[in-house]
Image: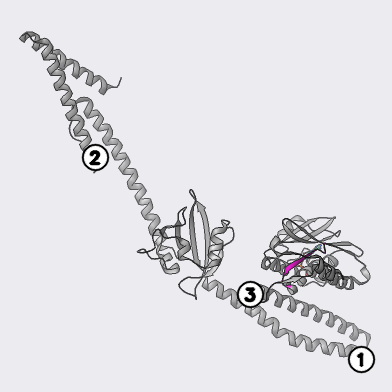
Amino acid sequence: MYQSGKLMVYSLLITLLVSGLIGWILGYPREALIISLFGWSLYQIYLFERVMKWLKREDGSEPPEAPGAWGDLLDGLYRLQRRGHDKERALRGIINRFQHSSAALQDAVVIIDQKDNLEWWNRSAERLLGLSPKSDRRRSILNLLRDPRFIRYYRKHNYQEPLELTSPINEQVTLQYHITHFGQGDRLLVARDITRLKKLEQTRQSFVSNASHELRTPLTVIRGYLETFQDQELPKPLMRGLQQMEQQTLRMEGLVRDMLMLSRLESTEHVTEDVSVDIHQMLKEIRRDALILSGDQQHQISIDADPRYDLLGQDKELHSAFSNLVFNAVRHTPAQAEIRIRWKVDVNGGHLSVEDNGPGIEPFHLPRLTERFYRVDESRSSDSGGTGLGLSIVKYVMVRHGGQLKIQSSLGKGSCFSCHFPPDSVIALENEALATHNG
Ligand code: ADP
């Protein structure tokens, strides 16, 4: 038993002993015992009431004086209460600091609960998203940010990639939204003002695009003259020089063409409606061009394409992407290498792959292959006639078609570049259409 418990028992025993003794002297021992027990109980109830009254106050004031066990109990409760108050104060300090620091943030920070309602936001959220502390608390985020692209992004639940949109209150401001899950179904939305970055990016894109445009005319003139000179009877060393000049001019033209293509892919949404693309026919044309590129190297190029399916997309972009893959297979494999082009459809969508049995690529290069001008073997690749932009173009085309480029390769065995399209971009042909196609 605790010391305080013992004290209570002693006080009861002493009360009973003294009252019993007095009662015995006066000749009423039983009555004296009952009265003293009743009195002792009333006193305990009175002390209990005092403790409760103090507990209810919750103002951190000192506890009332109380004898024996009640005193010990009050001391213990007081200590507990103070510890609780200290913890609460520390927590409030942390919350205040968090609110102050997030208020000072340039980024908008918004906490959203499981029911999509706004719970808390900082001052930048009022400036960038137009949230109002008076009217928007507990309102649904989807009623405030109504752009369909935001709603689609918000409902997707997969927030690996950020979303870029103009601010709902200022068309001139571009925001980048990031959402993170936390707690039990709560979400943290961060919106960053990227207007300056976006402008810089646009300036860079238009510079590349303008420079490439400007280079086109002088290159055409130079090539025209070079062709004319080659028709003349000229000394051999001069002829060799002219041939090399023409080769380099052709390379520069290719570079300019690819740079223009890339900047168009980067800077614009789809300009025209998606159309049904006859993949079978397109692959046949690409194969024909690839055989011309191969020339006397005689690459073995085969097509295995399911003719029952077309692809919904941008004709020119897809042609450019697939031909880049097939031409790469010709350029980066030795003479007579085998190249297989496949077009297949399954429940996951449409899959176009270009596989070769060339030298393959070491694994550590693979993640960087789609970077601009990244080459596995600098000296060999630039000789091969490529521009160093082919796979970047393929990657962009795939992103614009909601698909993905995957690269598998093993050294000494060969490589496989595959383009995966989502199921909704595959068109199954009716029998009639199929007959016309194949005809
Ligand atoms: P390039 O114009 O140099 O071909 P790409 O962006 O098309 O530029 O390709 C990047 C690099 O990837 C190439 O330089 C080459 O080293 C490597 N590569 C691409 N396709 C193949 C392939 N089929 N086999 C081996 N290496 C390849």
User: Does the rendering let one see residue 91?
Assistant: yes
Q: Position of residue 88 (x, y in %)?
A: 33, 45
On residue 290, the disc is: none
Task: Name the amino acid type tagged 2.
Answer: Lys
Q: CA distance from mark 1 to mark 3?
A: 44 Å
The extreme left residue here reads 26
- Mark 1 or mark 3: name the one nearer the start of the chain: 1
Residue beneath the point at 82% across and 73% down: 385
- Mark 3 or mark 2: name the one nearer the start of the chain: 2
Helix, strand or loop at label 3? It is: helix
Q: Main secondary structure of the magenta part?
A: strand
Number of numbered labels in the structure image: 3
The extreme front residue here reads 432
Q: Nearer the viewer, mark 2 or mark 1?
A: 2
Location of mark 1 (residue) = 232
Helix, strand or loop at label 2? It is: helix
Q: Does mark 2 have its CB less than 8 Å from ligand 1?
A: no
On residue 267, the disc is: 3
User: Does the rendering let one see residue 18?
Assistant: no
Residue beneath the point at 80% across and 88% down: 222
Q: Is residue 291 left or right of residue 21?
A: right
Query: For the magenta stretch, what is the residue range?
Result: 305-314
Q: Is residue 340 left or right of residue 211?
A: right
User: In this rendering, is residue 17 above or below 242?
Assistant: above
Location of mark 2 (residue) = 56
Q: Position of residue 155 (x, y in %)?
A: 55, 58
Q: Position of residue 348 (x, y in %)?
A: 72, 56
